[in-house]
Each structure stands twice: as structure tokens, then as C-alpha cells.
């Protein structure tokens, strides 16, 4: 297997800023402690394709509820690769946990954005049977898979990214 990427924490300052922006009632000291305890994504077994992302807070979502999670993680990867993020299989199967954008697409140039390439995940419990989704603190909730991609022969994209959602004008 080719080694194509590395996970890193965003800076402490970026994480605290994003945490407080997401959870306005949070205290800076709380965000600082959470930052210290962030876990980098890991594969569970040698044969796993997905890197498990660990939640920086305990999550409880009733059906229909959603939550935006600042992971504190960014991914540095080779050009020509993309990180695709999906719900962990068991959570999707048992609770119909969904990513609100269906599949998270983390481009290689997101790493250099103003927000340091901070990966956010917005999840929804889409259970139809009333099941409550519970993910413990530092439990795996999303999996990311690195995938190569190609471009067309006449591609002429020259723009430089600076941001996440909507940064390319859409």
C-alpha cells in the first residue's frame, strides 16, 4: 500500500476558535482540555480501509436531531488524492446515522486553507424506529478513506482554495 497522507491536529488556537464558534456556551478552558485529548484517526486492523475519527464529545441524538462536530483534525495528503468520509458502518446500519452532505469530500488543497483544513462533520440520526444514537466520548463515529482521483485531459483549473464549504463559489 502506498503511504499518501498524514493526520494532524489543527493548532490549539484554531480548534478553540472553532469549538467556541460551534458551541457558544463553551468555555475556553473546556476547549483547551478537549484539544489536549484529541485522538488522531486510526485504522482498527491491517485490512481496514477506513481511518476511524473519534468524537471529541459524547453524542446523544434522538431521531431527526443533528450535530456539527469540529474534529480538531486535518489531513495532509499527496496531490491527486482525496479523503472520503462516511459514517462508521455499524452506526449507519443500526441508526441510519447520516453525514448531512452524504459523503464528506476532503480535497488535498483544503489543508492549506485559512482554517488550517479543520475537518468538521455534521451528522443526523435518521432512525425510523425511534432508536437513540449514542456515541461515547472518544468513540469512533466517522471513517475516512483515501482515494486517488483523475482529471480530464482538457482540465485547466488554476484557482487556489481558501476555505471549506462554498470556497469555490458554489
Image (tube, rainbow, N blue to C red):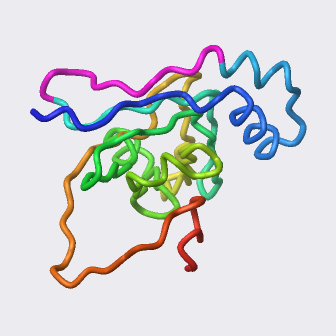
Residue in view at x 55 percent, y 30 percent: 55
Number of on-image labels = 0
Residue in view at x 39 percent, y 59 percent: 103
Residue at the limit of the structure toward the bottom, as seen here: 154
Residue in view at x 64 percent, y 51 percent: 114
Q: Quadrant of the C terminus?
A: bottom right
Residue 134 or residue 110, whichever sits in front: 110
Q: Which percent across, then down, holds residue 148?
A: 19, 54
Is 41 one of the magenta-colored residues?
A: yes
Q: Does residue 128 appear to the left or right of 44 in the view shown?
A: right
Q: Quadrant of the N terminus?
A: top left
Q: Does residue 156 appear to the left or right of 60 in the view shown?
A: left
Query: Does residue 69 sit above or below 122 in this rendering?
Result: above
Q: Main secondary structure of the magenta part?
A: loop
Q: Which percent across, then down, holds residue 70?
A: 63, 40
Is 133 one of the magenta-colored residues?
A: no
| Location of residue 107 by image quarter | bottom left
Q: Which percent across, then down, holds residue 77?
A: 33, 42
Residue at the limit of the structure toward the left, as seen here: 1
The boundaries of the magenta stretch are 36-47
Amino acid at each position: 500500500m502506498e503511504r499518501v497522507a498524514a493526520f494532524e491536529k489543527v493548532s490549539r488556537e484554531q480548534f478553540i476558535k472553532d469549538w467556541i464558534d460551534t458551541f457558544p456556551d463553551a468555555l475556553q478552558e473546556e476547549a483547551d482540555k478537549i484539544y489536549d485529548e484529541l485522538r488522531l484517526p486510526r485504522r482498527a486492523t491491517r485490512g481496514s480501509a477506513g481511518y476511524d475519527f473519534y468524537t471529541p464529545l459524547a453524542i446523544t441524538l434522538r431521531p431527526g436531531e443533528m450535530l456539527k462536530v469540529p474534529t480538531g483534525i486535518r489531513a495532509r495528503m499527496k496531490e491527486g488524492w482525496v479523503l472520503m468520509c462516511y459514517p462508521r458502518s455499524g452506526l449507519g446500519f443500526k441508526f441510519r446515522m447520516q453525514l448531512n452532505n452524504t459523503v464528506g469530500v476532503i480535497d488535498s488543497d483544503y489543508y492549506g486553507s485559512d482554517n488550517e483544513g479543520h475537518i468538521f462533520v455534521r451528522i443526523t440520526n435518521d432512525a425510523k424506529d425511534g432508536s437513540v444514537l449514542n456515541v461515547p466520548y472518544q468513540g469512533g463515529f466517522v471513517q475516512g478513506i483515501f482515494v486517488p482521483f483523475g482529471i480530464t485531459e482538457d482540465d485547466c483549473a488554476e484557482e487556489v482554495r481558501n476555505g471549506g464549504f462554498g470556497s469555490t463559489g458554489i
